[in-house]
Image (spheres, rainbow, N blue to C red):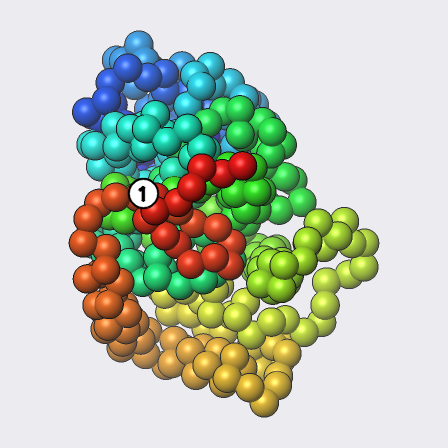
Amino acid sequence: MPVHNALPHLDEAIESILGQTFREFEFVVLDDASTDGSSERLRYWAAVDSRIRLLRVDENLGPVASSNRVAEEARAPFVARMDADDISYPERLAEQLAVLRRHDDVGVVGSLCDTIDGKGRKLRGPEFWRLSRRSAFVPFAHGSMMYRREIFEKAGGYRNECVYWEDQDLVVRMAAIARVAVIPRALYRVRQSTTSTRIVCTRERMEGALQTVFQATDRLEHGLPFDDLLSRSEPAPLKLDPRVFIALGSLHLWAGGKPRLLRRFLSRAQMSWNGRTASALIWTAWASLSPSTLRAFLLMLLKARNRFPGRQLVSTSPVVWEPMQKPVPIVAIEPKQ
């Protein structure tokens, strides 16, 4: 778990790991040059529980380098990720480890999650519908995954060129090496708050990262590589994919804020006569005018989307996810060659 200025949610995150039903682990924590009091809390917890191995750097490494550092410091053959403002349910590690031990061809296992706000109140439940569609987007939260260390190393770890979407990039690359499994129930709680790394970074950096994400996933949908997007030297495009504004606005919407992106959308979005532009225009306008009713509508939409896959996923058996392949029950697949 990398930590940079994670108060006031740090204690809950640590307690959720120390309280796991599976107890034989090393908890590698990196204090990434925190300045908000997180350092003192980490020293307290390291003194309380000997399973915590606390590291510190004096200059902030950022999300990619800090993620690589804690992964490289881990000494076990199985590595679980944890984000410093989220919460793991008590059985998370036990259930994920059981999947990896039972299925030798599975290299990564994530889970669905609940979403909470800054005060820990539940905003929405698990999105079962994501496990019934073909998509290039990873259907689980970064902090919810566990993986085999050898698969992480073979994939090359997180890439600096993919800052703010380093998790999506990593899982896609690991999926080309080993199977990625998803436990179809919530074992993790993702916190949407105004202190999120993706919210406090500059708008231009997030727009640029999201633009590359959508370009990369478009390539994946057509079976094409996207590494060349990471090495381009030309300046960022003047016009952005309309989906960038929905993705950016969603961070603020679920954190309880009021996304004010309509004016920027009208000046910066790539306008076309298609459903993608129309839906993004409606979304940004609605979010600017009445975020509370948009949240209510999105919750209704989630409930409707979940109805069919919710009936299909009647067991807790994991499913296998691959980019642009419909997830299938893990018991129905042949070993990966």
Q: Which residue is mark 1?
A: 331
Q: Residue at x 19, y 62 (%)?
A: 311
Position of residue 181 measured from the top left corner of the image (x, y, whole percent): 38, 42
Above/below status of 6 relative to 274: above
Q: Quadrant of residue 232?
A: bottom right
Name, please, the residue furthest toward the front: 334
Q: Secondary structure at mark 1?
A: helix
Using the image as rendered, state which of residue 83 and residue 10 is in the foreground.
83
In x, y percent, where is residue 176? 57, 42
Q: Quadrant of residue 282?
A: bottom left
Residue 195 is situated, as x and y percent measured from the top left of the image, at 40, 48
* 103 on left or right of 159: left
Query: Residue 163: image x %, image y %?
Result: 59, 45
In the rendered image, which quarter is residue 57 located in? top right
Q: Is residue 44 visible?
A: no
Depth check, front residue: 302 or 251: 302
* Image quadrant occupied by the C terminus: top right
188 to 19, vertically: above or below: below
Q: Is residue 65 rendered to the left or right of residue 303?
A: right
Q: Residue at x 22, y 37 (%)?
A: 89
Mark 1 neighbour density, 10 Å: few (under 14) some (14–19) many (20 or more): few
Rendered residue at 23%/55% (across/down): 313
Is 90 on the left-hand or right-hand side of 203?
A: left
Observer-nearest of 81 and 256: 81
Q: Residue furthest right?
A: 233
On the question of residue 25 being in view, the answer is yes
